[in-house]
Image (cartoon, rainbow, N blue to C red):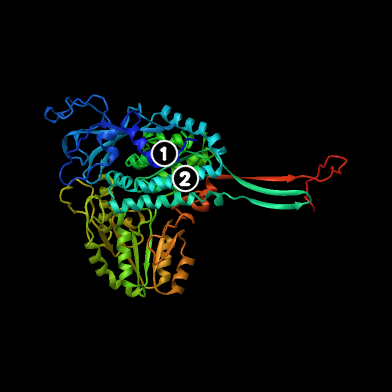
Amino acid sequence: MRSATNPSKRLRESFRMLREENRPFNGAPIGERVPSGCPPPPAWYTAEKLGTSRAAVKNRRAEDAPTSHGKEVEGKGEPTKDICGKRGPLFIAPTVKLFIDGKFIESKSDKWMDIHNPATNEVIGRVPQATKAEMDAAVSSCKRAFPSWADTSILSRQQVLLRYQQLIKENLKEIARLITLEQGKTLADAEGDVFRGLQVVEHACSVTSLMLGETMPSITKDMDLYSYRLPLGVCAGIAPFNFPAMIPLWMFPMAMVCGNTFLMKPSERVPGATILLAKLLQDSGAPDGTLNVIHGQHEALFSFVVIIYFLLKAVNFICDHLDIKAISFVGSNQAGEYIFERGSRHGKRVQANMGAKNHGVVMPDANKENTLNQLVGAAFGAAGQRCMALSTAILVGEAKKWLPELVERAKKLRVNAGDQPGADLGPLITPHAKERVCNLIDSGTKEGASILLDGRDIKVKGYENGNFVGPTIISNVKPNMICYKEEIFGPVLLVLETDTLDEAIKIVNDNPYGNGTAIFTTNGATARKYSHLVDVGQVGVNVPIPVPLPMFSFTGSRASFRGDTNFYGKQGIQFYTQLKTVTSQWKEEDASLSSPAVVMPTMGR
């Protein structure tokens, strides 16, 4: 195992290496000039860290040729765009590298996908669809690294994670800036993204307690029974776009501290955070090959008519490869069902966190000020792009009178690019996502719902091409409406009204999802009744987004989850390990049997 006695020194050294031949991104120099109103590019997107790619660019304008470098620079990707997507003479979109066997590898793929800044829709990078040979190399690297990593003492693996959590803390703001650039969420929300993943890393450091086995001494004379946990081998993770740091950190740290090696496939829309996290783990002392990162597409794999094979290439590879023993997935229901079925068919463990329709039940005795603020924050934060977003409010009895105040509070939210001061919510991830959200809003009006606050036509000054949808509140919603049955995944709050708590519980239980729910009340008996009767895996009492801390596990249920064992906490340890049970007998005297025992042993009966 590589030495990591001075992580800060190692990190400085790694940045020096990135400036030379071993870089995670590759592209033409950006220079120091950044247009007014645009965020400065994260350090890993700057010329200092990127160097220069040499592929030909045929459509470069003469007036855009950089003069400060003495000659025109050639590179893969979009020419003449600065980091904010506006025309400029010094930018060519950097290409994201693979991370295999401790090295950043330039892909030889002929299929590349653009990475866009959601606030501007301009290209800021390009990510490859890894080739079959590159993906095979990544799995082979994990397989080679597994025996020695599994044999590494549990205390040594713990030390790697202890150093890792410190490096994440030191680089938290840098990771967050990269998330905001690629994903669009506000900087404060991006920091929360990293922090909630960091909490799982910190909990993984308690592996010496989490991995304890069981012992039953003297089960019969001179015989002991004990069990202990062993790693599975090579595991894989497929992550979504909405939490570029948190979800990968739910996966590979828990798997690796148990002794597994890991193949990570981040979302092709937001690969930067995972690449940086992989490098920081290497700098924490993780041996080469214990964590490899490949790229491919899975976000838009499925259409209503056909599945395009090459888009499924990375996902099918992970599901089918015989050396991969377990798959962790977070994303849409269509993709999750596909991955669960295909992975299970090939003998793998699969855990798949999928879609949701999370309800907040508001009782008339609830703390009004707190409840309204909680509803607004949980519905519209991160532009509603959370699998635990509180997308549906059920107002019980007199609580329906609070609706006008709810609308007024939502109106005060500020929509802007995620890096802008005071922004409460940023853009949606793609133009397609915006179109889908707007279409679902339209469907509500066609089916008789009422739009109390409409964010479809919002324009953000300076970011007119961004994927922005403002806070939207729709009332008079019925459970048979399309906007209710579909997971909207945008800044839209649906409002239903009931007369009783029992009616509210029935609405929640009749919908297929079971990710999260919340009740707002000052009555303990009401809260207890709701918590016990509602068929949802995670319940908040006056807590709108009840994502458990990592000493517990993420326990979504019903259509929100496929698999037998959930993410992180004790459930995560169980998913990434297998039990071995040993029955041991050491007799003090010679065996007294004079002939072989052919009857089922009764062990002391």
CA distance separating discs 2 and 1? 11 Å
Categorize mark 1 by other alpha carbons within 10 Å: few (<14), some (14-19), many (20+).
many
Q: Residue at x 52, y 34 (%)?
A: 323
- Among the 4 quarters of the image, the one containing residue 68: top left
Please tell me whether mark 2 sits on a helix, a strand or a loop. helix
Task: List the single residue furthest toward the left.
Answer: 63
> How many tags in the picture?
2
- Counting from the top left corner in percent of width and height, residue 554 is at 46, 54
Nearer to me, 539 or 435: 539
Nearer to me, 330 or 514: 330
The residue where tag 2 is placed is 161
Q: Residue at x 45, y 59 (%)?
A: 538
- Counting from the top left corner in percent of width and height, residue 451 is at 24, 61
- Among the 4 quarters of the image, the one containing residue 86: top left
Q: Earlier in the sequence, mark 2 or mark 1?
A: 2
Q: Residue at x 28, y 71 (%)?
A: 402
Mark on residue 283?
1
Q: Amino acid at mark 1?
A: Asp
Nearer to me, 595 or 23: 23
Mark on residue 428?
none
Please tell me whether mark 1 sits on a helix, a strand or a loop. helix
Q: Residue at x 30, y 71 (%)?
A: 369
